[in-house]
Amino acid sequence: MESSKDITHRAFTILAFFFMVGTSVLIVPAGLAEAAKQDSWLAAIVGIGLNVGFAALYVLLAERHAGRTLVQIGELLLGRWIGKLLGAFFASFCFVLASLMVGDMGYFLTSQILVDTPMEPLLIMFVCAIALTVRKGMKGFSYAAEIFFPWIVLLLVLFIIPMMPDFDGRRMMPFMEYGPVPILKGGVSFFAFQELVVLLMIYPSVKAGKGKGKGFLIGTALGGLVLILTTLGSIGVLGSDLTANHLYPAYTMAKNIKIGRFLERIEGIMIFIWICSIFVKITLTFHASLLAFSEALGVKDLRALLWPCAIGLVVMALLCYPNVFFIRKFLSTSWLPYASIFLVIMPLLYLMVSFFRGKTA
Amino acid sequence: MRTLSLCRAGAAVCAFALVLLLSGCWSRHELNELAIVVGLGIDKTDEGYKVTAQIVNPSQVSTRNGINATLAPVVTFTEDGRTVPEALRRMTNQSSKRLYFAHLRIVVFGERLARDGIAKPLDYLSRDAEMRNDFYLVVARESTPAEVLGIYSAMDPIPANNLYTKLYNSDTLWAATGQITLDRLTIDLSASGKSPALTGIEIAGNKVRGRTRFNNQGIAPSAVMEYRGMAVFVGDKMVGWLDADGTKALNYLQNSIHQTLGVQKCGENGKLSLAVMHSETRVRVARAGDMPVIHVHVRVESDLSDLECGMDFGKAEALESLRKEARKTLTQLFEHGIEEAQGMGADIFGFGLEVHRQQPALWHRIRDWNEVFRHVRVQVYPDLYVRKIGTIDKSVERMVKE
């Protein structure tokens, strides 16, 4: 893990894009449709708007204290002890998030494709790949993301365009049937699934310059666009009732892809979108949690934490995911209050203190 | 030096460990271990379900080794179970291979099950990961699903494939059937404001001979599986059958016509056929007091298919009178279909959806849409355009006379 400060702006934009798309593109339309019915797409726009807004706040905070990670900013602003304590909490948040996503991936693969496969070996292999990636450092990883990016875009195009003939705009009607409240509710809980604040841990490793913050926002907006289109598509193709009742509406839609009568059954290829983006997101989050732990605990070399935490990731994923019912309930009721501590309260607190104490603090 | 060789040994062990993975993954299923299910029949028994699976007999379908005419191209197994998955698992007692559902083409419900409710068996079809949603669902008419799936088919040796393409073609060319897939059906079932309808399948001809390979030995098959009308549902329970005209009206009114053909009176005792090439339906919901009033505009574009009268379309009045006649015929067709559906209290056209979309305030005051639908006023406004007349001008009949 060299602290080489040369993740390029373009690579960072792409990382932010993947970070937005990862996991959400699979599961989010269902939750949105449950909250906002046929207005889900509006809720998605609200959620993306919130994301871009908060991303701008994060950039503001990070640029005020350039070269420091979120944990270091906390230490600087609130003093060593409180800063480190909050940093440790943040590290645990990233760790839980990473393990939840590992569990997401495992449950998705074993309930849709590899039905007979026990989950443990899948998780172990996946986490091994993640740990090796983290070990090699974020710079090379960011290049890898750049290589994946055009393929993902190609697959997304291949995913979205064949849906158009099945798309029925009338399924969006009536417009705002239950008023703005469910839309806002849906949008807010949607926002809590894109934990962009995690990116503040690698923000200092990105080459300094004007394009850095812009890249963050552009990546967020582009990823958001994909999420909006997916939500729009699920409502227009499946209708809100079916979208809400499917665990993975996007995958269900992918099963419908048909180009002419010859290019069918390509959902197996589409899985690449989800596995690739979730891989990027988990890697970034896991790296962030290690970095936050090491900074909070004063560990010099990340590698000392790497493998113990990686094993912990698998165990935690299995612990967090006793069954699908539990996780659905957890995500719909507990995740928003828990995540907003770190997504909203912590950055806002830091920002306020930062303004109060002045730049140099 | 020693550390280097240790390192190498470690690498070698790792490389060999990878070989273990080469034996494949848990969920692998070799093609020769799979029984590819192409058709599934589900009917109700007193205890639960009777499930029939039609499985491809691969050696009879591949042409490479030449076909042994004494063996059937498919095999069907029938098994009882308290639930559908139980019956399918129990079927392993009969099948030598593992049942594989990703290539399922058609699901046939028994009428008894349909009248009792199809929601329960549908759960398994939607929940199972192997099931896709590109297969069609139909209801067996005057026979059981097991009988339907036991008939030899003409042309396509795999009966389920035959049923699949037959439904596709008849719906796109003739429009007296409906190709309903699992997601379409579940969308309709979950919507309040649209009742589902599934095409009916019956065995026409000699049922007994149809079960044997002699079925296709005559040039005219002894028995043919034939689509006829559609089963109408209220909620998930079937309430009655719609005839061919009713089904056509349904396809027109829910805007799912690809092509069809209509016959029109022409002149004194002549006839002409119009091939419908395009049809576009718009539903407008107005309100009269507490009741919705539904206006359906149907714009039909057609080509002349044959002309069996002496009508001269060079004259503008001729075309005008043809259009007038056609509007009358279409109005009759639609009104007849609507009446039939209203009699059953099943809004198969999805007018309720439009009421919901266009008059949400009114919709929320309606408790039981299907009851209201029985008395709703529906106005149809068909309009017909004739675009092309084929490759000749005057009718052949007229040429003969001249």
Image: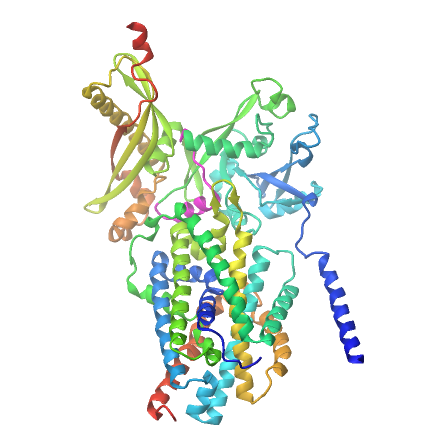
Magenta span of residues: B174-193
**On screen, B320 above or below B3?**
above
Kindly identify the residue that appears in the image at 49 percent across and 77 percent down.
Answer: A6
Can residue A240 be seen here? The reply is no
* Colour setting: rainbow
In the picture, measured across the screen, residue B152 lies left or right of residue A54, that is right
Kindly identify the residue that appears in the image at 18 percent across and 46 percent down.
Answer: B289
Kindly identify the residue that appears in the image at 28 percent across and 5 percent down.
Answer: B402
Which quadrant holds residue B205? Answer: top right
**On screen, A222 above or below B89?**
below
Count of numbered marks:
0
In the picture, measured across the screen, residue B174 lies left or right of residue B286, that is right
Whether the magenta-drawn stretch holds residue B249 is answered as no
In the picture, measured across the screen, residue B369 lies left or right of residue B167, that is left
Residue A58 is situated, as x and y percent measured from the top left of the image, at: 39, 78
Residue B193 is situated, as x and y percent measured from the top left of the image, at: 34, 46
Q: Residue furthest top?
A: B401
Residue A143 is situated, as x and y percent measured from the top left of the image, at: 52, 69
In the picture, measured across the screen, residue B310 lies left or right of residue B120, that is left
- The one nearer the camera, A63 or A71, is A63
- The one nearer the camera, B319 or B132, is B319
Which quadrant holds residue B302? Answer: top left
- The one nearer the camera, B255 or A274, is A274
Quarter that holds the N terminus of chain B = bottom right
Can residue A230 be seen here? The reply is yes
Residue A153 is situated, as x and y percent measured from the top left of the image, at: 46, 58
Kindly identify the residue that appears in the image at 42 percent across and 46 percent down.
Answer: B189
**On screen, A50 above or below B80?**
below
